[in-house]
Image: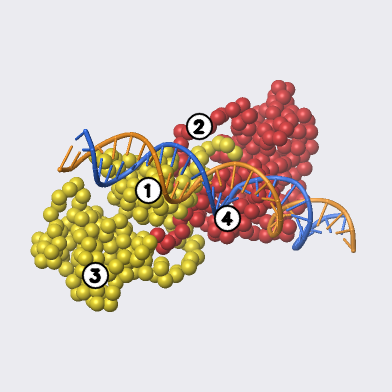
Chain colours: A yellow, B red, C blue, D orange
DNA sequence: CGCATGGTTCGATCCTTATCGAAGCATTCC
DNA sequence: GGAATGCTTCGATAAGGATCGAACCATGCG
């Protein structure tokens, strides 16, 4: 029984919750840094780093170093396909609802994903931004339209690309399984939400809780 | 990160070596009993039983009880497809050859698989039995031809179905990745090999070692 | 050059889980 | 009914690995 490919080794790499979350986050196709992945997985940076080196050694990830940033991505479409297959089985098997507590419900509605907003609210927002043609879908990329640039400028949100980081980026939402908005624009919008006190971050959690008035304001500006 | 299908749970089920071996053995499509799977995985019966109940609870296996026998099989083609995908990644990633020691080499040539012979010799034997039309391939089933019945009768091997257990059954070989012969006929052949002292079982191992003369005899009878 | 920041390595702790022997159930055979 | 066989459950042990704080390396910025 010692022959053949070591399937237990590969499967056990995916079999740890932290690593599974990381891989799941990378299924969006965009490479992420160690800190982003640590946040996504809900573990500390050293822990994430340890997991990432295991995934690298297992051949599941590729690494692109850019200056002091190190971007991790899935190694191949084959790896992505394997994860898809596992997700498929998990979905088929898993009407296993585990404790949909109040904390989780709040997370589902709105939460922080690194530095931008995620959850139902964030997905709905991106949908509306497309509907209103403030953002344009261009293959897998998201671009800002001229009307969009004007709109965000009016809101006091800077939309000029400064660093290497893209202004707009799609990020796959875990709970909704559709994209929400990342990139500097996504980050700026979250900043505004917090600065305007429309919502506050829950302590020791990624949940974002809107006040009653704040929710109204947010919907007026982004969901109308 | 608590949302969506629990992919870590599914992956970790496959991520244990013993369970991976069991699933691998079941990839042949034929359902196997707990004892057979214990042997394949190289663990004790209680351990195997524990693993099997976990795989059942995880929805990866189905169970068919027939009297005091309990046959475990893969739950669905989807599960099989997932395992295939994992194998694919493991193969792509894994020129990781681990210690092909003499013990493993012997196992590759000939070993016991529950109560019948497995390994290169066994696969070659089944090929020859088909070539000589002593056995007939019938979809996924294997049948004994009339000439085959006569042939084995001449060798002193009983081929009448007594119990529920089939006379012939294909069993996927780990090392060769092709089928060898199981069922009562497979068991009877192994019995003859041992009884004629053509080979002996290695102690505390599944390896079967042929003597020089025994190998000649075996080849004359089954590989000619 | 020094400081700040993103990442990794190290060491200690803790928890999960694989493992097997012994005992207990269930089913069939005599 | 008893004996035998296939399988599961229980209990105790042991090993592996996930985790985090603290210290360490590397790159970029002023």
Q: Are marks 1 and 3 on the same chain?
A: yes
Residue at the image point whose x is 74% and y is 28% from the top: B198
Q: CA distance from mark 1 to mark 2?
A: 32 Å
Kindly identify which residue carries mark 4.
Answer: B55
Please say if D3 is above or below A207. Answer: above
C-alpha gap between disc 1 and disc 4 = 33 Å
Q: Of the residues tagged 1 and 4, which is closer to the observer?
A: 1
Circle 3 packing at 10 Å, graded few (<14), some (14-19), many (20+), is: few
Q: Which mark is residue A45?
A: 1
Residue beneath label 2, please?
A: B97
Badge 3 element: loop
Chain holding disc 3: A
Q: Quadrant of residue A154?
A: bottom left
Q: Residues within 10 Å of mark 2 (few under 14, many from 20)?
A: few
Mark 4 touches mark 2? (CB < 8 Å): no
Report the side of A10 relative to B57 (left or right): left
Q: In this figure, which residue is indicated by the disc labeled 3? A: A197
Circle 4 crowding by C-alpha within 10 Å: few under 14, some 14–19, many from 20: many
Secondary element under disc 2, as helix, strand or loop, is loop
Element type where label 1 sits in the image:
helix
Q: Earlier in the sequence, mark 1 or mark 3?
A: 1
Up/down of B112 relative to A86, above or below: above
The N terminus of chain A lies in quadrant: top right
Picture quadrant of residue A173: bottom left
């Amino acid at each position: 029984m010692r022959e053949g490919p070591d399937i237990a080794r590969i499967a056990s790499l995916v079999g740890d919750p932290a690593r599974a979350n990381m891989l799941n986050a990378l299924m969006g196709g965009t490479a992420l840094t160690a800190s982003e992945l640590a946040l996504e997985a809900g573990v500390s940076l050293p822990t994430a780093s340890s997991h990432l080196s295991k995934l690298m050694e297992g051949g599941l990830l590729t690494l692109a170093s850019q200056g002091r940033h190190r971007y991790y991505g899935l190694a191949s479409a084959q790896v992505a396909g394997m994860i898809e297959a596992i997700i498929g089985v998990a979905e088929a098997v898993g009407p296993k609802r585990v404790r949909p507590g109040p904390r989780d419900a709040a997370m589902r509605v709105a939460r922080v994903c690194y530095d931008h907003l995620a959850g139902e609210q964030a997905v709905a927002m991106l949908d509306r931004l497309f509907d209103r043609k403030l953002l344009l879908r261009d293959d897998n990329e998201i671009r800002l339209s001229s009307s969009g640039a004007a709109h965000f400028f009016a809101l006091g949100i800077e939309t000029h690309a400064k660093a290497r980081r893209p202004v707009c980026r799609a990020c796959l939402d875990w709970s909704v399984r559709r994209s929400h908005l990342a990139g500097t624009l996504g980050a700026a919008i979250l900043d505004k939400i917090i600065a305007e006190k429309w919502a506050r971050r829950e302590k020791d959690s990624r949940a974002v809780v809107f006040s009653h008035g704040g929710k109204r304001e947010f919907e007026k500006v982004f969901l109308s």
